Image: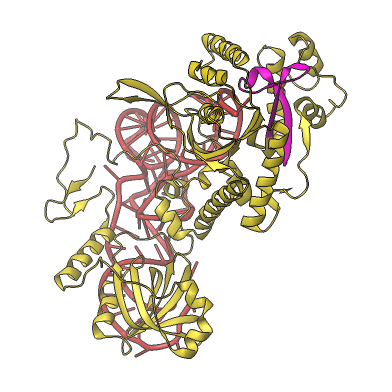
Amino acid sequence: MITPCVNCRFTMLPDWNEIIRLRYQKAERMRSENIEPFVHRWLPSHSTAAVRENSAQLIESKEKVRVAGRIIALRMMGKAAFFHIKDESGALQCYVKIDAVPEHSFYVLKTYTDIGDIVGVEGEVFITRTGELTVLAQDYRILAKSMRPLPEKWHGLRDPETRYRQRYVDLIVNDHVRETFVRRSQIVSTMREYLTALGYLEVETPMMHPICGGANARPFKTHHNALDMDLYLRIAPELYLKRLMVGGFERIFEINRNFRNEGISTRHNPEFTMLELYTAYWDYRDTMDLTEDTIRSVAQRVFGATAFTFDGKEFDLGPPFPRLTYLEAIRRFVPGAENVDLRWDDPPEVTKAKIAPFFTPEFDGPTYQLLIDMFEALVEPQLQGPIFITEFAKAVSPLAKSKPGDPLVAERFELYIGGMEIANGYSELNDPQEQYQRFKEQMEARARGDEEAQQMDEDYIRALEYGMPPASGLGIGIDRLVMVLTNSPSIRDVILFPLLKPEKWVAGHEEDPEQPAREREC
RNA sequence: GGGCGUGUAGCUCAGCGGUAGAGCAGCGGACUUUUAAUCCGUUGGUCGAAGGUUCGAUUCCUUCCACGCUCACCA
């Protein structure tokens, strides 16, 4: 709740303290002395990095430079002052002494400047006695006054809640956070360039779906007023992208947000970024090759390396990624299970008996469910990867082509790195009648209470009836890929503004009706 | 949703039945090559919220709120 102060024109936020009040008063006094605390324009000639890069020449030529940035440390010494400014490219020391700047400039520095202010400095570059590259100011001004104190200079900002809620402060103070998001941006743009060079066309498909499909997940629901129609935020763009394949596009991709109304964890955010891609005339093996090449190339171009550490463990994207079928992976990674002959077509009791020495499922279910439970509990956490797992149960892959000669298995793969599913792809089911049957099976599961089962999409069937070329698709979880490449243990560390419950007082929250808004003064 | 943990000054953290502490930041003063500047002085707290136990609660108990980890859900 924002309230105006009863004594002055300031609008107060409820977390104001004495430091903030004093800074607002400073800004008022500046205005009364015709010193603008928020100037309109002041163009730097050099970034701090450019000053560093050209330091020898700048020192030699005594050329004037104009640098700007936020004061992150300030040492006032009576008739002189040292401070560090930080801009996007780094930090740089500045030195202001009383007899080298106009009287007015020194007055502004001494009287009105706080740590956190964004300032402009014009002067010559020199090296101090202690060897630090420094701008000796000939002019100094405040460009934008900061009204709130920054976190402590030595320990910085640690509280995770504040870091996520007030990411702007996190970014000011914690350099590695900025670094992570720069890397994220480079990963995405490099991926775009890589795929575009291979002839893929980037497209945009709807985020609001009347029928939500393309994945098994619970959606967010919303409503369009003018059409009086419920809509879902998309859980996946898949069915629209494949409609485009019917339309004749042969290589397309989309990098965009998906929304899933599910639990939040270190590897799940309700909105997350997915690369989804389709290639006509390929099957899932070709897409595995592309996945591997893309991820390896992006890592090399962005980081100049293929070896990484995630969560204290190393992985290498350089060598060919191994490929194991689902059942092979269970035999390989469950100790003692090397020789167990698991089969998708065994009756559940038989499977239960076969896996009994290693795993006791919590619930009874069909064979594929027992095997999936076992895989997720015992195998997945061990898949440091990179490794492709292939041949998934068809029952949980309603949009994938089945494997010839293996009616319970889909031509599908998932890529695991760091114990996480990073990518998922398959040979796309393009037989409209089979797709219709698969949707019906999903509808039956839904009727049995499976809220994540997919919905029938008749228009999608109609599209397939026109004929979709053989094709294979891919989804890459961008957030998770960024996690493993930047060694970020939580998905919140790679999403600028992860979803949090709002603070009580922010706009949108009703004030307690029992408690009428108090008058406040600052 | 379950379990465990955290919440004390703007920030980082101590204190854990007896009237609330430090460092940094802030404020006042000294200081024209400092860099965690230094030196002197000093302000600042509904100890997350509400109940309870107690002569007395930041401290113990209960409930609630927020956040973190984890399990479940999620593939």
Q: Nearer the viewer, residue A254 or B28?
A: A254
Q: In this view, does A27 lie above or below A406?
A: below
Q: In this view, does A182 lie above or below A463?
A: below
Q: Position of residue A474 (x, y in %)?
A: 62, 35
Residue A406 placement (x, y as % from top left): 77, 17
Query: Which colouring convention does the figure follow?
Result: by chain
Quadrant containing the N terminus of chain A in the rendered view: top left
Percent of width and height locating residue B23: 44, 66
Kindly tell me whether residue A230 is visible in this rendering: yes
Query: In this view of the protein, can residue A127 be seen by the observer?
Result: no
The residue located at (30%, 69%) in the rendering is: A143
Q: Is residue A409 magenta?
A: yes
Quadrant of the drawing holding the C terminus of chain A = bottom left
- Tell me which residue sits at (59%, 16%) in the image: A432
Colour chain A appears in: yellow
Q: Is residue A76 above or below residue A245?
A: below
Residue at position x 69%, y 52% in the image:
A308
Residue at the spot 55% in from the left edge and 27% down from the top edge: A246
User: In the displayed image of the protein, which residue is found farthest to the left?
Assistant: A7
Chain ID for red: B
Tell me if residue B28 comes above or below residue A421 in the rendering.
Answer: below
